[in-house]
């Protein structure tokens, strides 16, 4: 009887352990499912907000073996009409519910500046016709939040460039990073080929605004802008002209052609946040043309704008255009190469800079999320 009692106790213990282990496994499975349902709820809320910016959320939403309750409210940190989204997902498990709560912020914006240079409809051509001109054109990165570009202390970082089309990196151009494109050629300098670009910055709807006439800044003149948004039907800047920002941010929208003469400077270090948003719609393309020695401290976003940079252009920021090239010669029927290709110091601070879309919502990059088991 003693032996039977010991065996009965051992059997009961083994059954209890087995049952407990099964319950633990079920709990872990339910917790993982609840987390995935909460993630799905975040993305569903973004889709609903894109269809209706006044979407308030909903409760008891059936989702793949569980339910989710979604709460949407105006964010305290507004970026393009931001919304705070709170999703509580529940999955039934023996003895109760496994729950996960995720909180994130959805911005009515996109974050396109993940590339230093990107041609949405290719090609992207960086080439010097005169290889005797030194130093070589350099594509690298820095962070303006740490001060002006300095090659030894705040510079020399990597940056990717690309195109939805062909990319040519030829003759005295150094790219400290990778290159993505349908086809990538580089000579004589080898570059890291990232393959085809998986996506491209999106077009934007034209703002509902009153468009001012071309400012027509004369040779050597200055266009000084206070913080705010400016809407121009076209922009003409004479040789030696300057566009300055007395504070930040300053955003200049250009509906039509942008033409700059030689030695034009837009923005200035340190710390001026000046953004140019050229034609980014789906209609006829526009042109962005500069003369020699062009300087840009800021960003250019023009998914439907052909960007043609003169010799010896230097950009402290980023450029996204329909096509990006120089004004001389031709390549596949398009303007090709500069006597000295442009230099780009990509500003990594732009990676967190949104472009307001008026319709598209997306989860903010780097959003803090709280997970509650």
Image: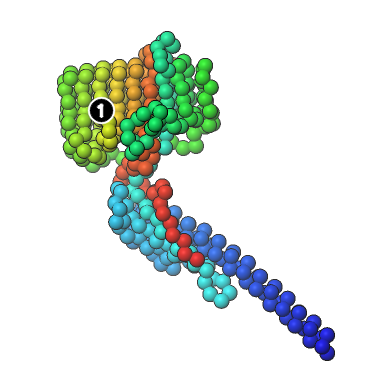
The location of residue 21, given as percent across then percent down, is 66, 70
Residue 278 in view, yes or no: no
What residue is drawn where x is 51% and y is 19%? 189
Nearest the viewer among 241 and 4 is 4
Task: Give the answer, above or below, for where 165 lies relative to 291.
Answer: below
Q: Coloured how?
A: rainbow
What residue is drawn where x is 32% and y is 32%? 148
Q: Is residue 269 left or right of residue 3?
A: left
Which image quarter: residue 161?
top left
Residue neighbourhood size for the residue with mark 1, other residues' Cα within 10 Å, grouped as few (<14), some (14–19), many (≥20): many
What residue is drawn where x is 44% and y is 68%? 60
Q: Name the residue furthest front.
A: 153
Nearest the viewer among 358 and 271 is 271
The location of residue 87, given as percent across then percent down, is 42, 62
Nearest the viewer among 216 and 226 is 226
The location of residue 315, given as percent across then percent down, is 34, 27
The location of residue 73, given as percent across then percent down, is 32, 60
Which image quarter: residue 333?
top left
Question: Which residue is the site of mark 1?
Answer: 266
Q: In this view, does 370 lie to the left or right of 271?
A: right
Which image quarter: residue 150?
top left
Nearest the viewer among 284 and 122 is 122
Q: Is residue 10 left or right of residue 118?
A: right
Task: Give the answer, above or below, for where 1 lies relative to 148.
Answer: below
Task: Give the answer, above or below, for where 37 lies relative to 4.
Answer: above
What residue is drawn where x is 30% and y is 17%? 292
Total marks placed: 1
């Amino acid at each position: 009887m003693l032996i039977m009692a010991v065996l009965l106790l051992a059997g009961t213990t083994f059954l209890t352990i087995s049952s407990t282990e099964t319950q633990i496994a079920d709990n872990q499975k339910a917790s993982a499912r609840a987390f995935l349902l909460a993630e799905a709820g975040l993305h569903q809320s973004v889709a609903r907000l894109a269809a209706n910016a006044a979407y308030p959320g909903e409760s008891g939403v059936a989702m793949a073996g569980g339910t989710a309750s979604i709460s949407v409210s105006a964010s305290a940190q507004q970026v393009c009409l931001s919304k705070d989204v709170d999703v509580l997902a529940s999955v039934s498990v023996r003895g109760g519910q496994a729950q996960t709560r995720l909180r994130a912020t959805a911005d009515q914006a996109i974050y396109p500046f993940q590339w230093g240079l990107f041609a949405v409809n290719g090609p992207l051509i960086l080439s010097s016709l005169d290889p005797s001109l030194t130093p070589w054109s350099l594509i690298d990165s820095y962070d303006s939040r740490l001060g002006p570009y300095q090659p030894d202390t705040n510079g020399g970082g990597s940056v990717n460039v690309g195109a939805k089309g062909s990319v040519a990196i030829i003759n005295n151009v150094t790219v400290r990073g990778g290159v993505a494109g349908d086809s990538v050629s580089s000579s004589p300098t080898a570059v890291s080929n990232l393959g085809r670009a998986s996506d491209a910055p999106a077009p934007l709807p034209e703002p509902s605004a009153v468009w001012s006439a071309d400012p027509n800044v004369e040779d050597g003149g200055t266009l000084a802008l206070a913080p705010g948004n400016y809407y121009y039907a076209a922009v003409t800047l004479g040789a030696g002209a300057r566009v300055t920002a007395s504070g930040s941010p300053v955003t200049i929208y250009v509906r039509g052609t942008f033409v700059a003469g030689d030695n034009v400077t837009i923005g200035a270090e340190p710390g001026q946040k000046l953004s140019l948003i050229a034609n980014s719609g789906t209609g006829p393309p526009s042109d962005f043309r500069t003369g020699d020695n062009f300087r840009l401290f800021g960003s250019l976003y023009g998914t439907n704008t052909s960007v043609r940079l003169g010799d010896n252009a230097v950009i402290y920021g980023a450029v996204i255009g329909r096509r990006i090239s120089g004004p001389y010669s031709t390549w596949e029927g398009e303007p090709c190469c500069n006597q000295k290709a442009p230099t780009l110091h990509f500003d990594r601070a732009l990676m967190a800079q949104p472009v307001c879309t008026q319709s598209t919502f997306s989860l903010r990059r780097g959003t803090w999320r709280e997970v509650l088991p």
